[in-house]
Amino acid sequence: MSGSAILLQFLNGLAGASSLFLVAAGLSLIFGVSRIVNFAHGSLYMLGMYLAVSLSASIGFWASVPLSAALVAAVGCLIEVGFLRRIYKAPELLQLLATFALVLIIKDAALWAWGAQDMLGPRAPGLAGAVSIAGSQFPQYDLLLIVLGPAVFMALHLLLTRTRWGTLVRAATQDREMAAALGVNERRLFTAAFTLGALLAGFGGASAIPREPASLEIDLGVIADAFVVVVVGGLGSIPGAFLAALLIGEVKAFCIGLGYSELTLAIEFIVMALVLVLRPWGLLGRPLPQVRGAGTVEPPLPAPSFLLLAALAALLAVVPAFSGPYTVVLLTDILVFALFAASLHFLMGPGGMPSFGHAAYFGLGAYAAGLLLLRAHLPMELSLALAPLAAGVGALIFGWFCVQLSGVYLAMLTLAFAQIAWSIAFQWDELTGGSNGLIGVWPAPWLASKQAYYYLTLVLCLGAVALLWRLIYSPFGYALRAARDSPLRAEAIGIDVRIQQWAAFGVAGLFAGVGGALYAFSKGSISPETLSVPRSVDGLVMVLLGGVQTLSGPLWGAALFTWLEDSLSRGVEYWRAAIGAVILVLVMAFPQGIAGFLKQRFLK
Amino acid sequence: MKKLLLFLTLLSLTNPVFAQAIKIGELNSYKVFPAFLEPYKKGWELALEEINRSGGVLGRKLEVVSRDDGGTPGDAVRVAEELISREQAAVLMGTFASNVGLAVANLAQQRKVVFMAAEPLTDKIVWENGNRYTFRLRPSTYMQVAMLVPEAARLKKKRWAIVYPNYEYGQSATASFKKLLAKAQPDVEFVAEQTPPLGKIDAGAVVQALLEAKPDAIFSSLFAVDLQKFVREGNTRGLFKSAAVVNLLGGEPEYLDTLKDETPEGWWVTGYPWSEINTPEHKKFSDAYEKRWKDYPRVGSVVGYTALHAVANGIRKAGSLQSDKLIAALEGLQMETPFGQILWRPIDHQSTMGAYVGQLAKKGGQGVMVNWHYADGAKYQPSDQEVRALRKE
């Protein structure tokens, strides 16, 4: 690269960093105060874009930016008051489920309001052209963005350090119970912080329209980037987010400038993995204070009802005799996802380690099954038996790094590893078939009929679930739960906490791999989506929907979610929004999850 | 009572209205790619109305059972299973993304059901992963690249840079372009390659990196959001002043119409200049379409419309719904389409539907195609020998 090229890519990086920071700042603020992992932040950003594009046609670009930001802030305020406020006391991460439902609803609302076609916004009047820098043309608007990021940063910094409101926010970020005890009106503070966060998201979206068209796909892309920035910077730290945005913006620009553009597929996740391995709390973050609340004290699990599982198995075994062939296909999917959710639950519930990247092990199992069959030419039965080992080994490798962390940092590191695994599967054309994946992964002839395969799935999935349940009540399971509930005391009585957690990763990965391998053979093909973020999110949704503090919850969650998707997508035009609405209602009505609710209702 | 039953039975035997409808199982990623698939759906809905108005097929009505496939291969396979086993669909039709199309094609082979892959562009669906149950309508990535290569060679530019979305479509477009252009113009040099993630191009940095390589010309297979960002940054930074551009799919209304006054003039593209095609077969289609939907047709509309007509024609010719007979009927089937006559190639089940090749221009603040001609898909195929080798036959 020449000197001028370096300068220009540096400026490109700064402009990119500014727009990253604008979304990440709001997310960090919201998380810092309310501990909400706000999946809908990207949707608010998208809303800001659509509003700005349509408003700028009538009132001009410059007026549309603040107006759109204000409108999005109002939406944010409504979301907080209408939904999130009601579930602050629910188990941790449940708010995540509510915001996920909002993602689905907002996406379909935008499709309904603005239609399917992407909308390219206007150029910014007055800053439409380019200036000459080192012999190259550089967009004037990007210069404004370069200034805008630091300006918003300074404004936020002053707000948080120099005003009374800012002091309260910081107090709540550090210890929200203490702040409440001292008479701070928590409710109002949370609402204000969420509204401000939404305002920043809307502002970020609106100010991006001269560079980027409004499209329905932007929400998930933005949220992933914003999460990475927030976590790399350190949760709740605005200066950290700024630094992280700079780092990632520049790394991206220079990857492209130096001709390694294929790296940009996963570069932010590689950066995140590196940062978290070296600095477990992000660049400028501090260890998270313990949140005290109703949701954090987990009651001990009741004895597992293997009887229930046996009854369920018996019931499922006679289903094919009374139903059409499609029911068997759908039930096969449900069983596979039930095992997937149960393995994630093992990690999240008894293990106390939330994973945002559990699809990695599901996908590893699926790919291993496909590769053993197609590339190593092993018999199908052997491929199915060996594939979970690959997932288990993968989980042990990733887990070794993850168990050094805790909470959301741990979850984000699992996400980073999953994304890296995804990008390898996506890029390694010769081995994995690249973006198209592996085609022709069919079961052996004796299992080819839907019924035969269903029975195989039934035996393996419920067997695996029974094994998982058994493990939770083995000495290993007790040690794991001790490590979750009180790591210090567990250490003191001689339990090696890290080893227990590491082993839990291996076990969860292994069982997710069983699910993945079964999935591969039931579909006949596998593509990178089996280890993508949406698949991981589906797993989370199933576990949370069913109830993370129960044993059978993940099974009900998986069944309900898969069935909802299958039946709503068939009959309802805006089926994504419909799923979102159902989830939202369930979250509001049963914050303990379905199984949790049933237990409360009938077993007390 | 008995008499009434007898009467009804006789009626159902003689009157086609009482015969059971022929079910076509249609699945597509309607909520993931709505910009392309809403026009597609309107296209096949129009065709369905036409077919049934003219008496249906084999004396029976045609019915399309349409499903959202969720946009992932796993969900799509389940949906296809549902269409086959619960709905008893005689034929499958649809899909958009290549990975979904390939997964459903593979299932079609497993379940021995004919699959009309309407949209997927991937070469593999008829070649490496082709099977006898799968037919594909749209001109493939290879064909569309081959249509653009003569224009690219005529530019007589030596230094070419390439930008493509980082997945199979972009990769195979790039590979085909390099191979075909090097054959047409042996002194060509490829000086830079940029492959941004699909939908997430960092356009400023990419344009800057391309400028740095000082290319005479650029081959791009970007589309949708990536194309819009690339065009705007390139316009601002003056990339297109110094370099000619050839862009796959850039003239399709789905992507072109969003560019408006940013439309870069002079680019060579494949596309669909719907407002300027005056052939009677296209006029008939576009008039009917605009009358029915109060909207102009997109590429997706033509694809949906033609795909369902192809299925209907195949069934008519076969006189049966049996997969084997249907395959035999579709192989070599000739039919009218809005783009003119096409043939379903027996060798690889690819239709010879072509695309329009032309240059972009601005007209009244809108992007249009000028200097265009129709490139007949039959002319842009590798040799039969190569095809057989790819299909491992």
Image: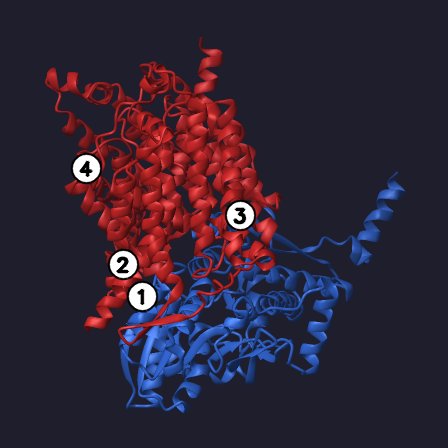
Chain colours: A red, B blue
Mark found first going from the N terminus, 2 or 3 = 3
Mark 1–mark 2 Cα distance, whole angstroms, equals 8 Å
Q: Position of residue A222 (x, y in %)?
A: 39, 49
Q: Is residue A537 above or below residue B167?
A: above
Kindly indicate the quadrant of the structure image that contains residue A297.
Answer: top left
Q: Secondary structure at mark 2?
A: helix
Q: Is residue A460 visible?
A: no
Q: Amino acid at mark 1?
A: Ala
Q: Which residue is mark 2?
A: A252
At 24% from the left edge and 19% from the top edge, which residue is drawn?
A: A485
In the rendered image, residues at marks 2 and 4 fall on the same chain: yes
Q: Name the disc covering residue B205, or none.
A: 1
Q: Name the disc covering residue A280, or none.
A: 4
Q: Nearer the viewer, residue B28 or B268?
A: B268
Q: For the residues labelled 3 and 1, say whether their Cβ atoms are less than 8 Å apart.
A: no
Q: Is residue A426 above or below residue B148?
A: above
In the rendered image, residues at marks 3 and 1 fall on the same chain: no
Q: How many marks?
A: 4
Q: Amino acid at mark 2?
A: Lys
Mark found first going from the N terminus, 4 or 3 = 3
Kindly indicate the quadrant of the structure image that contains residue A481.
Answer: top left
Q: Secondary structure at mark 4?
A: loop
Q: Nearer the viewer, residue A2 or A66?
A: A66
Q: Which residue is mark 3?
A: A67
Q: Position of residue B343 (x, y in %)?
A: 57, 78
Q: Quadrant of the C terminus of chain B?
A: bottom left
In the rendered image, residues at marks 2 and 3 fall on the same chain: yes
Chain containing the residue with disc 1:
B
At 80% from the left edge and 52% from the top edge, which residue is drawn?
A: B12
